[in-house]
C-alpha cells in the first residue's frame, strides 16, 4: 500500500498503548588529530597509554597514526552518550603528554605530505590489511584529504518501533525485510536533503593555506595563512574534501537492498584503469593497495549516509553480511566537528539529526534515478560552497526554490515530529532543538 502521510503516521503512533516513536539508539565516532604545541601534526606513534589501536573498543586511529577515532557505545539517552564521549576525551587528554587534540574538521598545519604518518597496527594479518588499505587511500586520493576529520552519527530504532511501524503501514514483509527496506527509504530521502544538515551544521568554511588538494586554488585569501570561500558551509564535504572524481561516475542506487548490492558490486570487483596502473605492489614488491578496483572495500565508498549491519564473521565481506542480516542502523557521515563545543557535538545537534532522520523515514520521496541522484549532488555541492549566500537556491521538481524558503517548509515536518517525540518522552527538548 502507498506510504501514509506524516500526519496519519504520527496519529497512528499516538494511538498506540505505548508509542515507540522515541525509542532511538545513537552512537558517535569522532575523529581528531593529535597535534604538537606548535600547531603542527604529531609525528609520534599512537601513545601506548591509549591501548592498542587495533583492538581497543573506544580509542583507535583512522587514516593517520596521528588521527584518533573515539568511539562510544550505543545509547538511548543523549546525556549518557555525551557523558561517555566526554569521559573518553578526558582519558585521551590525560595520556597524550604535551600534545593537544585539534578540535576542527579541516587539518592543522601540515607542510609536507610525508609529514602525515599512515596508521600502523602491528604485524598480524588483519593489522597489515588495515595498513595496506590506508596505503591504497594515500595512493588514490593523497594523504592531505585523509587527514580531514568528522563525526559519524550512528542511528537506529528499536525492534518494537519497527513492529509498530510495520503494523501501521500494514506491511506483509518479515520484520527484517521491512526494517531493511524502510531503512533504504530513509537513506535515499536523507541523501536528497543532505544539503539541509550541511547548511545547519557545516563548520569548515576555511582551511589552512598549507592544505594541498584539488580545488584549493579556487579559494580566496582570508588572512596570510588561511584560505576560505565567503559563503561556504562545509568545505570538508566539497571538492577539496571527501570527494572522488572516479566515484562520482558511479551511480549507487538506494531504492532497495538488491539495487544497492547490484549497483555497488562492480566497483568492488572490476579493475579501475587508473588504480590498475598503480598495481597491487610497488616496484620493491611491497603491497600498496588491497585491489585495483574502484573500491578496495565497501567503506571506501564516500556517501553522506550508509546502511550498516551486525558484524559478521571475521572473513565475511560486509556486503554479504548486509545481504544476510539486513540493515540494523544507519551511519550519518556528513557532520563536521563543531569547534565551539568541547567534544565536537552537543545534545541539540543530536536531537535535530534525530528529527531529520525520522523525517526522511516517515515522509515519501522520489526513487533513485540518475537524474535524481545528480540533482541531489548539485544541491549538496551548491550549499557546501555558497549555502550562506542569501541568494542560494535548491533545485526541486517544482523548479528552483530559495534555500531559506525550502528550509522552512522542511522544518514544519520536523516540528510535527518534535511535538510527537516530546509528548511521548514528556519533555520539550526536541521542540527546543
Image: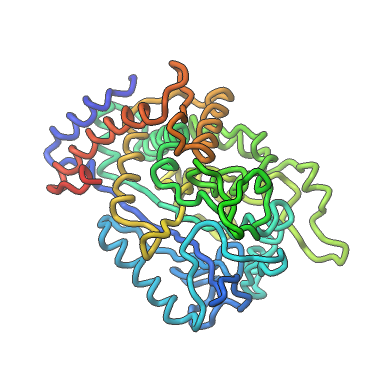
Q: On screen, 406 above or below 177?
A: above
Q: Is residue 337 left or right of residue 210?
A: left
Q: Position of residue 231 (x, y in %)?
A: 49, 41
Q: Position of residue 333 (x, y in %)?
A: 48, 48
- Rendering colour mode: rainbow
20 versus 71 height, above or below:
above
**Quadrant of the image containing the N terminus:** top left
Q: Residue at x 42, y 22 (%)?
A: 401
Q: Quadrant of residue 408?
A: top left
| Residue 259 appears anywhere in the view | no
**Residue drawn at 41 percent across, 52 percent down:** 153
Q: Nearer the viewer, residue 168 or 393?
A: 393
Q: Percent from the top left, x then y, of residue 16?
A: 14, 36
How many numbered discs?
0
Residue drawn at 54 percent across, 57 percent down: 106
Q: Residue furthest top?
A: 398
User: Quadrant of the rendered structure where residue 406 is?
Assistant: top left
Q: Confirm whether residue 155 shows in the render.
A: yes
Q: Position of residue 47 (x, y in %)?
A: 54, 80
332 and 162: which is toward the camera: 332
Name the one closer to the observer, 160 or 28: 28
Which residue is rendered at x = 33% and y = 51% of the image? 350
Task: Compare residues 394 and 276 and report the one nearer the observer.
Answer: 394
Amino acid at each position: 500500500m502507498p506510504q501514509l502521510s506524516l500526519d496519519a503516521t504520527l496519529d497512528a503512533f499516538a494511538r498506540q498503548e505505548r508509542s515507540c516513536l522515541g525509542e532511538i539508539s545513537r552512537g558517535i565516532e569522532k575523529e581528531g588529530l593529535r597535534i604538537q604545541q606548535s600547531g603542527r601534526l604529531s609525528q609520534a606513534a599512537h601513545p601506548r597509554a591509549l591501548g592498542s589501536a587495533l583492538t581497543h573498543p573506544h580509542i583507535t586511529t583512522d587514516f593517520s597514526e596521528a588521527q584518533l577515532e573515539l568511539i562510544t557505545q550505543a545509547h538511548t539517552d543523549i546525556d549518557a552518550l555525551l557523558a561517555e564521549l566526554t569521559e573518553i576525551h578526558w582519558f585521551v587528554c590525560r595520556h597524550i603528554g604535551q600534545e593537544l587534540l585539534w578540535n576542527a574538521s579541516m587539518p592543522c598545519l601540515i607542510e609536507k605530505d610525508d609529514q602525515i604518518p599512515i596508521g600502523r597496527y602491528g604485524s598480524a594479518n588483519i593489522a597489515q590489511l588495515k595498513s595496506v588499505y590506508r596505503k591504497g587511500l594515500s595512493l588514490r586520493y593523497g594523504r592531505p584529504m585523509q587527514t580531514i576529520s568528522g563525526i559519524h552519527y550512528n542511528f537506529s530504532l528499536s525492534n518494537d518501533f519497527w513492529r509498530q511501524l510495520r503494523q501501521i503501514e500494514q506491511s506483509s514483509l518479515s520484520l527484517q525485510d521491512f526494517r531493511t527496506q524502510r531503512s533504504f527509504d530513509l537513506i535515499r530521502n536523507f541523501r536528497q536533503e543532505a544539503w539541509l544538515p550541511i547548511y545547519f551544521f557545516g563548520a569548515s568554511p576555511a582551511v589552512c593555506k598549507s592544505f594541498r588538494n584539488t580545488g584549493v586554488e579556487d579559494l580566496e585569501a582570508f588572512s596570510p595563512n588561511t584560505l576560505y570561500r565567503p559563503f561556504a558551509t562545509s568545505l570538508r564535504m566539497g571538492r577539496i574534501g571527501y570527494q572522488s572524481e572516479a566515484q562520482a561516475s558511479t551511480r549507487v542506487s538506494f531504492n532497495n537492498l538488491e539495487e544497492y548490492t547490484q549497483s555497488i558490486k562492480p566497483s568492488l570487483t572490476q579493475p579501475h584503469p587508473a588504480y590498475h596502473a598503480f598495481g597491487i605492489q610497488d616496484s620493491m614488491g611491497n603491497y600498496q593497495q588491497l585491489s585495483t578496483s574502484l573500491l578496495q572495500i565497501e567503506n571506501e565508498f564516500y556517501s553522506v549516509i550508509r546502511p550498516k549491519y551486525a558484524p559478521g564473521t571475521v572473513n565475511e565481506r560486509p556486503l554479504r553480511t548486509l545481504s544476510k542480516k539486513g540493515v540494523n542502523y544507519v551511519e550519518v557521515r556528513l557532520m563536521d566537528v563543531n569547534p565551539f563545543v568541547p567534544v565536537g557535538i552537543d545534545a541539540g545537534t543530536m536531537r535535530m539529526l534525530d528529527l531529520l532522520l525520522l523525517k526522511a523515514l516517515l515522509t515519501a520521496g522520489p526513487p533513485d534515478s540518475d537524474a535524481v541522484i545528480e540533482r541531489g549532488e548539485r544541491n549538496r555541492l551548491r550549499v557546501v560552497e555558497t549555502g550562506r549566500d542569501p541568494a542560494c537556491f535548491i533545485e526541486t521538481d517544482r523548479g528552483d526554490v530559495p534555500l531559506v524558503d525550502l528550509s522552512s517548509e522542511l522544518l514544519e515536518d520536523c516540528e510535527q515530529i518534535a511535538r510527537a517525540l516530546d509528548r511521548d518522552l514528556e519533555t520539550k527538548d526536541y521542540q527546543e532543538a
